[in-house]
Amino acid sequence: MSQIIDPYYYFDRYAKTKILQIQSSGDEFFLLDNEDTFWQELQLATGGTYLRRLPNADHSCAGHEISLFWTMRSFYLSIYENKPLPSLRWMKTSNNTHGYIRAIVDFSVGPRPMSAYGYHARTLNDQRFVK
């Protein structure tokens, strides 16, 4: 069954396809670190995949419709008009006391970003489930 519904099993279909993955930071069903299991393989299969994470949003993304519209519009038009997209990568590390994310923007490829935002949250422990 998983070979039918799980995109991980047919990454070859995504070759040279740009993908915009949209996630909400407060999703009740999908945890923020889910992509850690497949992100590198997806990047290799597609030649570049992009992630838009909505802060303070639940699974429905209610209240974020305008932001989502502009994100999807910009992504679509960049692909349609064959314009280069920004090149960015990140690395995550963690230990028993804290986590660390380092983002790197490659200014030699694609347009220069006008701005970048970082969001963070603190938890009382390392539990990642929603009550």
Image (spheres, rainbow, N blue to C red):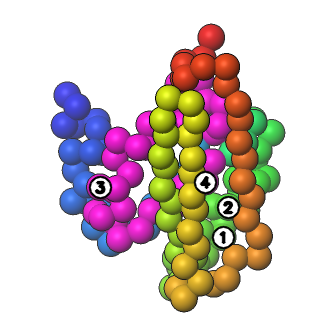
The label shown at residue 71 is: 2
Name the front one of labels 3 and 1.
Answer: 3
State how far apart marks 3 and 1 are (Cα). 25 Å
Please report whichever mark, 3 or 1, sits nearer to the chain's N-terminal start.
Answer: 3
Name the front one of labels 4 and 1.
Answer: 4
| Amino acid at the residue labelled 4 | Arg
Give whichever of 99, 1 is nearer the camera.
99
State how far apart marks 2 and 4 are (Cα). 8 Å
Residue in the image at 52% along x and 85% along y: 109
Graded by Cα atoms within 10 Å as few (under 14), some (14 to 19) or many (20 or more), the crowding at tag 3 reads: few
Residue at mark 1: 74
State how far apart marks 2 and 3 are (Cα). 24 Å
Query: Contact, CB < 8 Å: mark 2 with mark 4?
Result: yes
Give whichever of 115, 27 is nearer the camera.
115
Name the front one of labels 2 and 4.
Answer: 4
The label shown at residue 52 is: 4
User: What kind of element bears circle 1?
Assistant: helix
Please report whichever mark, 2 or 3, sits nearer to the chain's N-terminal start.
Answer: 3
Residue at mark 3: 41
| Amino acid at the residue labelled 1 | Ser
Q: Quadrant of residue 26?
A: top right
65 lies left or right of 111: right
| Amino acid at the residue labelled 2 | Thr
Residue in the image at 63% along x and 39% along y: 24
